[in-house]
């Protein structure tokens, strides 16, 4: 791991998310409970890939929890039952073959430096997942965002729902569900709406097609 890269991540994400950490966690509690948890069993082993401040992995109910991130700040936000793997995700994963039931990732793939790094990461995920395991991936969809996709300095790879499906198939994954438009683009600079509006939004997919950019 590059110390320079880790320090850069600390500065970027602290500056970007410092004022919204508490609200982001409350929003994630709703998203996990109302949408993601039904897709994840309480007896399963889950890895949060690019875990950030742990908003997903801290709130999901499962038997065993792992989190992977280069940012050393992640450690102080993860709960005691989460094992942090601090490494570059395109390097070999320190996990046994077929040891995971779910790999979850959100707003992460677009931050990888190259398409080759993404392809390597998917190969590692495929190796670590058990037969029948799932990769659940969310991220901004360049096909509906256009130029605002590049408003974040550390977005490197342009990814759409279609290109993500294609690279997943190249890596050996089957496709169960695809939502080209799901959540709004970002909480950065956005109003902090009451949580009941988040719950209502998740219950009405017609709203996803209007406001969804991920």
Image (spheres, rainbow, N blue to C red):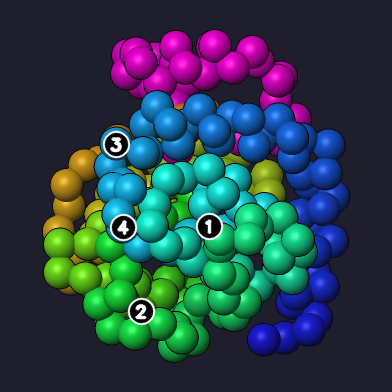
- Mark 1 highlights which residue? 108
- Tag 3 near tag 4, CB within 8 Å: no
Q: Secondary structure at mark 4?
A: loop
Q: Is residue 142 left or right of residue 51?
A: left
- The residue depicted at 67 percent of the width and 53 percent of the height is 53
Lower position in the chain sequence, tag 2 or tag 4: 4
- Distance from disc 3 to disc 4, alpha carbons, whole Å, reads 12 Å
Q: Is residue 130 left or right of residue 20?
A: left
Lower position in the chain sequence, tag 1 or tag 3: 3
Lower position in the chain sequence, tag 3 or tag 2: 3
Extent of the magenta region: 185-214
* Magenta span includes 187: yes
**Of tags 2 and 1, which is closer to the observer?**
2
- Mark 4 highlights which residue? 44
- Mark 3 highlights which residue? 38
- Distance from disc 2 to disc 1, alpha carbons, whole Å, reads 15 Å
**Of tags 3 and 4, which is closer to the observer?**
4
Q: What's the mark number on residue 7? A: none
**Of tags 3 and 2, which is closer to the observer?**
3
């Amino acid at each position: 791991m590059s110390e320079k890269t880790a320090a850069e991540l600390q500065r970027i994400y602290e500056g970007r998310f410092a004022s919204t950490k508490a609200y982001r966690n409350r929003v994630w509690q709703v998203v996990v409970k109302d949408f993601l948890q039904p897709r994840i069993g309480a007896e399963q082993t889950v890895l949060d890939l690019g875990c950030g401040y742990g908003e997903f992995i801290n709130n999901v109910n499962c038997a065993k929890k792992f989190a992977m991130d280069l940012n050393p700040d992640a450690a102080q936000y993860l709960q005691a039952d989460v094992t942090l793997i601090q490494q570059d995700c395109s390097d070999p994963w320190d996990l046994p073959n077929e040891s995971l039931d779910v790999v979850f990732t959100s707003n992460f793939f677009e931050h990888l430096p190259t398409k080759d790094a993404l392809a390597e990461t998917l190969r590692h995920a495929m190796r670590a997942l058990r037969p029948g395991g799932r990769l659940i991936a969310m991220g901004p969809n360049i096909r509906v965002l256009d130029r605002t996709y590049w408003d974040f300095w550390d977005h490197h790879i342009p990814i759409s729902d279609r290109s993500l499906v294609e690279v997943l198939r190249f890596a050996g994954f089957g496709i169960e569900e695809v939502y080209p438009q799901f959540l709004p683009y970002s909480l950065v600079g956005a109003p902090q709406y009451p949580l009941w509006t988040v719950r209502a939004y998740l219950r009405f997919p017609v709203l996803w097609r209007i406001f969804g950019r991920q």
